[in-house]
Image: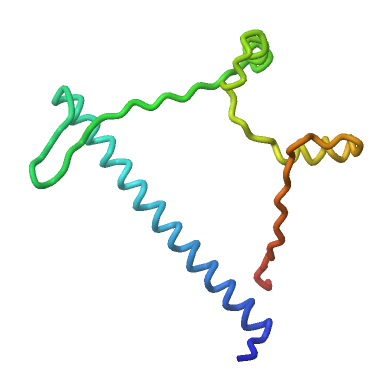
Amino acid sequence: MDTTTERLIKAYIKLRDAIEEKEREKGKLKEMQEKISVELLTRCEEAGGNISIPNVGRVSRRVSKRYWTSNWPALYKIIKERDAFNLLHQRITNSAMEQFLEDNPDIMPEGLNLDSEQTVVVTRAS
């Protein structure tokens, strides 16, 4: 079947619109779920622990912690002094590495890899 570029663009836009609508619906459902979660947490606190309803389900509380700093130089100093680099994520900032390599074409860090992928961008005619 010979599909024209026009048909492909129209199909792409239609699918993108459908995905966006599903994402909006998903957002509304997540919002409702969050409200119920808040109420269930309140009920767990009132009950003094977890809640179990036979043949229905169980509600248990979980504590999540997230650390951040407002003073990176001080944290870097401690990390360096204590050789505690495991405190940081092992991830390269893509834009910074790209700029570094452009500024230093004679340096290629051993083991550095690059994945490059081409994609298309489809815009709606106005």
Q: Position of residue 24 (x, y in %)?
A: 44, 57
In the picture shown, does residue 111 fall above or below 118? above
- For the C terminus, the image quarter is bottom right
Q: Is residue 71 above or below residue 119?
A: above
114 or 23: nearer the eye?
114
Left/right of residue 57 with respect to residue 15 in the rendered view: left
95 with respect to 68 (left or right): right
Task: Name the residue located 12 percent from the left edge and 46 percent from the top edge.
Answer: 56
**For the view shown, which residue lies furthest in the bottom direction?**
1
Which quarter of the image is occupied by the N terminus? Answer: bottom right
Query: Residue 19: percent from the left, percent from the top?
Result: 49, 64
* Picture residue at 70% right of the left edge, 57% below the top: 117
Residue 102 is situated, as x and y percent measured from the top left of the image, at 87, 40
- Residue at (65% x, 11% y) in the render: 74
Residue 110 percent coordinates (x, y): 77, 35
Q: Residue furthest right?
A: 106
